[in-house]
Amino acid sequence: MDVTNKALIEEIVKRVEQKLGELEGGSPIGEEVNYTRRLLSEKDIVEHNKAGIKKIVYSKNTIVTDVAKDYAKNFKIELIEQN
């Protein structure tokens, strides 16, 4: 696969992930997202960071891994537990 095709595929995947995030209750890209899954991992935060999300609101029932918390802190992503 050449570089052009790889970049195009990555852009398509990014846009699909953004749209799926919006469908799951997320706010517009670049602001915040409401995270609805049971586990919030570093991988999830990395993907939100790539999409420009700087605030993640999650349920009190969501488990946030320590690595995810560290990544969020290092990249200045605000994690907010919703009551």
Image (spheres, rainbow, N blue to C red):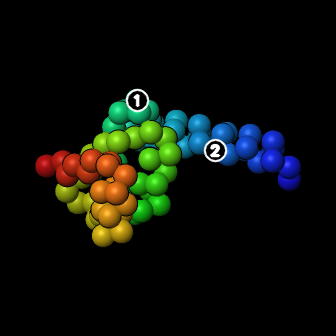
What residue is rendered at 19% in x and 56% in y?
60
Is residue 20 at least partly visible in the picture?
no
Q: Is residue 17 left or right of residue 40?
A: right
Is there a contact, CB below 8 Å, between mark 1 and mark 2? no
Q: Where is residue 68 in the image (x, y as percent from the top left)?
A: 36, 63
Q: In this view, does 11 lie to the left or right of 62?
A: right
Alpha carbon distance from label 1 to label 2: 17 Å
Of residue 59 and residue 9, the one placed in the foreground of this image is 9
Q: What element carries label 2?
A: helix
Of residue 67 and residue 74, the one placed in the foreground of this image is 74
What residue is rendered at 40% in x and 29% in y?
28
The quadrant where residue 61 appears: bottom left
Vertical arrangement, residue 39 with respect to residue 12, above or below: below
Question: Where does label 1 land, which residue?
Answer: 28
Q: In this view, does 46 lie to the left or right of 81?
A: right
Mark 2 packing: few (<14 Cα in 10 Å), some, or many (20+)? few
Vertical arrangement, residue 1 with respect to residue 4, above or below: below
Q: What element carries label 1?
A: loop
Q: Position of residue 10 (x, y in %)?
A: 67, 46
Residue ranking furthest to the top: 28
Residue ranking furthest to the right: 2
Question: Where does label 2 land, which residue?
Answer: 13
Q: Position of residue 51 (x, y in %)?
A: 49, 41
What residue is rendered at 26% in x and 51% in y?
79
Residue ranking furthest to the bottom: 66
Residue ranking furthest to the left: 83
Vertical arrangement, residue 68 with respect to residue 6, above or below: below
Amino acid tagged 2: Val
Vertical arrangement, residue 9 with respect to residue 68, above or below: above
